[in-house]
Amino acid sequence: MGGLKDIRNRITSVKSTRQITSAMKMVSAAKLKKAQDRVVQIRPYANKLREVLVEVSSGLGKDHVGTYNQTRKADKILIVLIASNRGLCGAFNANICKRAMQLINEDYSAQAEAGNVKFYCIGRKSYDFAKKSGFEVIGSNNEIFDELNFENTSKIAEYVMKLFADKVFDRVDIVFNSFKNAAVHHQLVEQFVPVSIEVEERSNPSEYIFEPKVEDIIEEMIPKSLKVQMFKSILDSNAAEHGARMTAMHQATDNATELIKDLTLMYNKARQAAITNEILEITSGANALKG
């Protein structure tokens, strides 16, 4: 009966695990709804802000160079890598770290060999990846997800923007998971600075009277646009994390249910075999007494 006891203990253990994964799934589902709503709300604002920036920039000369749109030779690279603080979310963290490594190998291999690729890490898993891969981490923020709001993300954006303005880095890219739905998220790379504003040539350009000067408006709008871009990227990653964790816990719960069924069947077969053996032993003993 020792085998039966082991199977019973394993069934109890798997049931406990299923309770945990089911609870985590429900928690992630609740958090996902709120995170998804925030992403959906900020995307139209970010897109419209970008449109306004392009519209206003159409009044600038092509030779205008501001603080954050200076295109320099990209010798020193900063990658802002956004991951999560915790695991149990499938391949969420592995995929984004893999995308960051792909970016370095394809676009910044020479800079990496010279030691000029560095990381700013948002989320503990991104920090662990950068350190394990041998890259220098100039800063990190693991607490941002505890109180995710525009004010806190603006501080990160301002810090990164100052590094570019002070010419510590020539280019900054953000690598993050973009939320599509609970089961699907895409690994994206967005150029943060220098800001690239593509102004379309128009046969009938819009005529506006700007006050103050267009240059001053642009210098005021670009920092706000960058802060919104950083906020949107972190919100995207946060929603994608909850979606990935909910999906992973759903699959884990289903797997636990299937395992319980298999173990229960195994237990019943073993119990039936044990009862059959006992009956055979009793019958054999009775026949021996008769003889």
Image: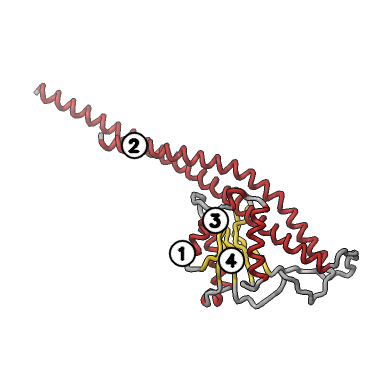
User: For mark 1, what is the residue?
Assistant: 132
Q: Name the residue located 75 percent from the left edge and 71 percent from the top edge.
A: 66
User: For mark 3, what is the residue?
Assistant: 123
Q: Earlier in the sequence, mark 4 or mark 2?
A: 2
Figure quadrant of the N terminus: top left
Q: Earlier in the sequence, mark 1 or mark 4?
A: 4
Spatial CA span between label 4 and label 2: 48 Å
Spatial CA span between label 2 and label 1: 38 Å
Disc ID at residue 79: 4
Comparing labels 3 and 2, the label whose residue is closer to the camera: 3
Q: Name the residue located 73 percent from the left edge and 60 percent from the top edge.
A: 224
Q: Quadrant of residue 290?
A: top left
Q: 255 or 212, which is in the foreground?
A: 212
Spatial CA span between label 3 and label 2: 37 Å
User: For mark 2, what is the residue?
Assistant: 9
Q: Position of residue 8 (x, y in %)?
A: 34, 35
Q: Is mark 1 on a helix, strand or loop?
A: helix
Q: Are marks 2 and 1 in contact (CB under 8 Å)?
A: no
- Under mark 2, the amino acid is Asn
